[in-house]
Amino acid sequence: MPDGMKISHEELERDGFSQNPFFHCLVAEVPPQHRTKEGYTLVGYALYFYTYSTWEGRSLYMEDFYVMPEFRGKGIGKALISNVARIGKEHQCVRLNFSVLSWNTPAINFYLNKGAQDLTTSDGWHCFRFDREALDKLAEEAVKQ
Amino acid sequence: VKITQRDLEQDGFSKNPFFQAIIAEVPEQHRSKEGHCKVGYALYFFAYSSWKGRSVYMEDLYVMSEYRGKGIGKALMSKIAQLGLAAGCKQLNFAVPNWNKPSVDFSLRQGCWNVTSDLGYHCMRCEGPALESLARGEAKH
């Protein structure tokens, strides 16, 4: 995993559970008799938010998708992603977008098996990012205008 | 384009809009041959990273070809950065096809970095029949 977590749980609570949340989240829970060694019954989650395409309309972006390693291969991941897709459909979303690291072959195969397309390989789409410092600098230019 | 003007109005201008947009306008004396003063736009929405928090995603950035090279694109992008920071965002993300060299060069000149080249992230998408299947809980065969 790149970097480290830079936000607190207070920030997550504020941003995910206010009136106009920045994100939504589904969790996968197992019955108590299947809990982990450490006692967890929450064993997976999917974090997503609504996005937009001027070509196709409402879409969803799945930012995080995770199942604890000991609970993989049991259909939990598929259930999570299917529910994200179902919720999207209920909100008239026509696309579900997400990213995956090129070296993560199990994940890529998981997604390709479900009919996903790899737009980076097929169409050359690359993701670009301004981090905080570069973002501050870019914003300063707007103030000067 | 698969959506209508009505979709755009409903989705962009309701109480909880799916997107926001800013427009670049030139004075009357610089209007285009067809009489347009609105010569560019940027469409964006708020996104999230569970590591870094709030972010802004720039979905579209467009300047009419005859108005390029004058700083309008940069002004639009800077404005989004400013609006994003004001809303508590820590990142601005967007996508560019890697064969679009003018756009890639423009983007890198503004100080961003290529997440796909540097970290290996691929943009994935599920749509149409595959998305329908997924929503029904079926696997693709």
Image (spheres, coloured by chain):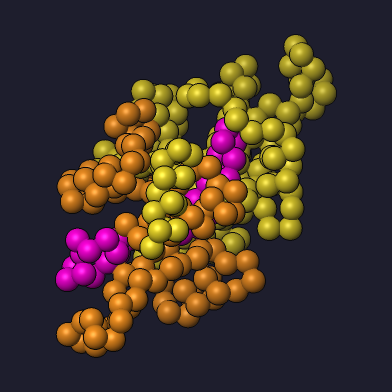
Does residue A122 appear left or right of residue A104 in this picture? Answer: left
* Highlighted magenta segment, given as a residue range: B44-73
Residue B27 image offset from top left, x and y in percent = 30, 81
Residue at (69, 40) in percent of width and height: A12
Is B108 placed above or below B24 here? above
Is A9 placed above or below B83 here? above
Q: Can residue A104 be seen at all in this image of the molecule?
A: yes
Chain A, hue in figure: yellow
Residue A8 image offset from top left, x and y in percent = 69, 33
Residue at (20, 87) in percent of width and height: B34
Q: Which of B4 and B50 is in front in this view?
A: B50
Extreme-right residue of the structure: A32
Quadrant of the image for the N terminus of chain B? bottom left
Q: In which quarter of the image is residue A79?
A: top right
Does residue A14 appear left or right of residue B139 in this picture? Answer: right
Q: Which of A95 and A112 is in front in this view?
A: A95
Residue A108 image offset from top left, x and y in percent = 40, 31
Number of residue marks? 0
Quadrant of the image for the C terminus of chain B? top left
Is B108 placed above or below A66 here? below
Is A91 placed above or below B6 here? above
Q: Which of B16 and A75 is in front in this view?
A: B16
Q: Can residue B47 be seen at all in this image of the molecule?
A: no
Q: Quadrant of residue A91?
A: bottom right
Residue at (44, 52) in percent of width and height: A139
Q: Which chain is orange?
A: B
Question: Magenta segment: does it hold B56?
Answer: yes
Question: Magenta segment: does it hold A20?
Answer: no
Does residue A14 appear left or right of residue A96 in this picture? Answer: right
Extreme-top residue of the structure: A37
Q: Quadrant of residue A143?
A: bottom left
